[in-house]
Amino acid sequence: MVLIAGLSLVVGGIGIMNIMLANIQQRVKEIGIRRAVGATSSDILVQFLLEAVVISVGGGLIGVLTGFMISYGISHFTGWSTLISLSSILVSFFVSVLVGLSFGIFPARRASEMDPIRALRYE
């Protein structure tokens, strides 16, 4: 079960990284303009890290709600009692956010290290 969960986290993290890389590719001009008017590399880095965290928070909330629905479905249709602990919800949610943050670092660094001149010339 741990192996399946770990594999799911890696696949989800790669998905977040791909979304962020595509997002950055579409917003090269915006990054160039922001850098040209005075935004620092750390400003760009923080912006894209926050976007990755927002995506992973959304995924974490969807995961928690799905877990509640599956637990309810199991108890309703089988008659088994299910237990949902607050600690399991918090751990799973924060692991989701941590995975999003860790897989969002590479795209955010890539965006923050863009040369403003090349970014403004990008077509």
Image (tube, helix red, strand yellow):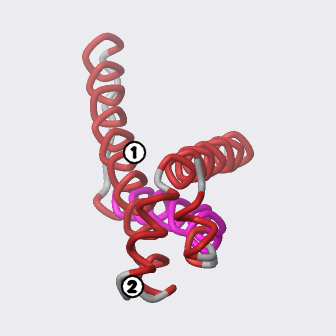
In the rendered structure, does residue 96 fall within the stretch colored magenta? yes
Query: Which mark is drawn over residue 97?
Result: none
Give the mark nearest the N terminus, 2 or 1.
2
In the image, residue 9 above or below residue 35: above
Mark 2 neighbour class, 10 Å CA radius: few under 14, some 14 to 19, many 20 or more: some
Which of the two discs, 2 and 1, sits closer to the camera? 2
Query: Of helix, strand and loop, which one carries label 2?
Result: loop
Give the number of callouts: 2
- Describe residue 28's horizontal placement relative to residue 60 as left or right: right
Q: Is residue 19 depicted above or below 46 in this figure?
A: above
Viewer-proximal residue, 64 or 100? 100
Name the residue nearer the viewer: 69 or 37: 37
65 up-or-down from 102: above or below: above
For mark 2, what is the residue? 39
Image location of residue 65, percent across then percent down: 28, 37
Give residue 15's quadrant in the image.
top right
Occupied quadrant, residue 35: bottom left
Looking at the rendered image, the quarter that the N terminus falls into is: top right
**Magenta stretch, main secondary structure class:** helix
**Which residue is more in the foreground, 93 or 11?**
11
Q: Residues within 10 Å of mark 1 (few under 14, many from 20)?
A: some
Residue 24 at x, y percent in the picture: 53, 55
Mark pair 2, 1: CA separation? 29 Å
| 83 up-or-down from 54: above or below | above
* Residue range (magenta): 89-110
Amino acid type shown at disc 1: Gly
Amino acid found under the numbered disc labelled 2: Ala
Image location of residue 86, percent across then percent down: 28, 60
Which residue is at a point 62% across and 45% down the rendered structure image? Answer: 18
Helix, strand or loop at mark 1: helix
Q: Which residue is mark 1?
A: 59
